[in-house]
Image (cartoon, helix red, strand yellow):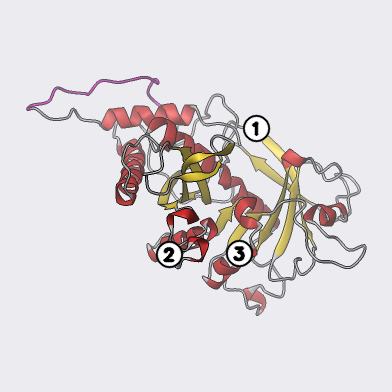
């Protein structure tokens, strides 16, 4: 998962500070924006890499300075860094802030990465007269005769951790050179193929080939990636919501933005320490012999997604301790820190219970 997040910071002397859009505040303000990557499956997620974005005014030649990096360029470099670190992932997933950028998708393709990214419904493309000009136009051209005769649409059941299921519909659409048999596929996912509600419709672009299509390597195609069907594309993009959950935990619980240093290296060290603390919490949770929770095995396509707040069903991750602060399990034998293991487990329990909806 690729995303960026901003935090407000006063003054001008701190590295990377500038007036820019801060998604956390929903407005343009003085602050620092960090591009980050996060690995996720249906059950667990953890941060990989992070790099602060430096606004152009920090460079002598502005945006033309060789050292200047746009956010999308930083994102590509972090994805390549994850591959170099040996991180195995099915696809790079990002929202429309990155997915709309042709250069971003092109650089990921050249780097050999698969991707599933959102695009805006009104993202325009050059087309003849009455041809589809936007993803929304392309979706409106898809045939639908009702749930019993879905025509171009395919039902996709999404199952959530709170036990409820939702029936969504997915379809291959065509827009310019994008289509089922193109190098880029356009996939529309929605709860209602007739209305295409704004808040429950995804427009996704992917370079993962269609099973049985001309780019399917199993059929002699030229794609370096195994083929994926519509259900798998829906599953992959559905995991992106863990990004927002990760931000809440590293920021609200672990103090991601609570630093008073000013230099670039000090800021990066602080962010790395927060990532280490986050990983420590998960490691303690899965290795605590009294928790009754075994480390998870490989995720499958039938695993559950995150769900609405409520009781968590009996799974390998069922919580076994009450939420709240817990003291150290024993007294220290000499002046030193008390064993933080149980505190880490308590922290993770509270975070899991506070998980928002998808």
Upstream in sequence: badge 2 or badge 1: 2
Q: Nearer the viewer, mark 2 or mark 1?
A: 2
- Membership of 208 in magenta stretch: no
In the drawing, what numbered circle is on residue 67? 2
Is 20 situated left or right of 97 in this image?
left
Residue 302 appears at what percent x and percent y? Answer: 59, 47
Upstream in sequence: badge 2 or badge 3: 2
Magenta segment: 320-334
Predominant secondary structure, magenta span: loop
The Cα–Cα distance between marks 2 and 3, rounded to whole angstroms, is 22 Å
- Membership of 331 in magenta stretch: yes
Q: Secondary structure at mark 3?
A: helix
Is residue 233 in view? yes
Upstream in sequence: badge 3 or badge 1: 3
Q: Nearer the viewer, mark 3 or mark 1?
A: 3
Disc 2: CA contacts within 10 A as few (<14), some (14-19) or many (>=20): few
Residue 265 appears at what percent x and percent y? Answer: 30, 51
The Cα–Cα distance between marks 3 and 1, rounded to whole angstroms, is 34 Å
Q: Which residue is mark 3?
A: 105
In the drawing, what numbered circle is on residue 164? 1
Residue 219 appears at what percent x and percent y? Answer: 67, 76
Q: Nearer the viewer, residue 61 or 70?
A: 61
Disc 3: CA contacts within 10 A as few (<14), some (14-19) or many (>=20): many
- Relative to 206, is 287 above or below? above
Q: Residue at x 24, y 31 (%)?
A: 340
Residue 132 appears at what percent x and percent y? Answer: 85, 60
């Amino acid at each position: 998962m690729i995303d960026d997040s901003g935090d407000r910071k006063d003054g001008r002397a701190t590295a990377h500070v500038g007036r820019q859009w801060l998604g956390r505040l929903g407005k343009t303000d003085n602050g620092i924006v960090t591009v980050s990557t996060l690995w996720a499956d249906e059950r667990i997620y953890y941060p990989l890499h992070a790099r602060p974005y430096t606004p152009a005014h920090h460079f002598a030649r502005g945006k033309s300075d060789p050292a200047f990096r746009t956010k999308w360029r930083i994102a590509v470099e972090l994805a390549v860094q994850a591959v170099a670190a040996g991180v195995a992932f099915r696809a790079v997933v990002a929202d429309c802030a990155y997915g709309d950028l042709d250069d971003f998708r092109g650089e990921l393709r050249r780097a050999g990465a698969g991707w599933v990214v959102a695009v805006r419904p009104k993202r325009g493309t050059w087309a003849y007269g009455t041809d589809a000009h936007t993803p929304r136009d392309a979706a409106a051209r898809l045939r639908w005769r009702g749930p019993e005769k879905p025509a171009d649409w395919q039902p996709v059941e999404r199952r959530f951790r709170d036990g409820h299921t939702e029936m969504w519909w997915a379809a291959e659409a065509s827009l310019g050179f994008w289509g089922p048999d193109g190098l880029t596929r356009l996939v529309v996912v929605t709860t209602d193929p007739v209305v295409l509600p704004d808040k429950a419709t995804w427009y996704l672009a992917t370079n993962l080939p269609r099973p049985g299509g001309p780019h399917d390597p199993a059929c002699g195609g030229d794609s370096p990636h195994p083929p994926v069907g519509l259900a798998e594309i829906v599953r992959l993009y559905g995991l992106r919501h863990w990004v927002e959950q990760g931000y809440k935990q590293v920021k609200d619980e672990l103090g991601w933005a609570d630093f008073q240093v000013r230099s670039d290296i000090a800021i990066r060290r602080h962010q790395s320490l927060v990532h280490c603390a986050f990983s420590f919490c998960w490691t303690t949770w899965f290795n605590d012999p009294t928790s009754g929770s075994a480390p998870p095995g490989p995720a499958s396509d039938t695993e559950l997604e995150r769900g609405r707040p409520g009781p968590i069903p009996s799974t390998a991750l069922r919580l076994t301790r009450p939420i709240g602060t817990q003291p150290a399990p024993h007294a220290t034998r000499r002046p030193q820190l008390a064993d933080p293991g149980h505190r880490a487990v308590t922290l993770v329990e509270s975070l899991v219970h506070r998980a928002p909806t998808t």
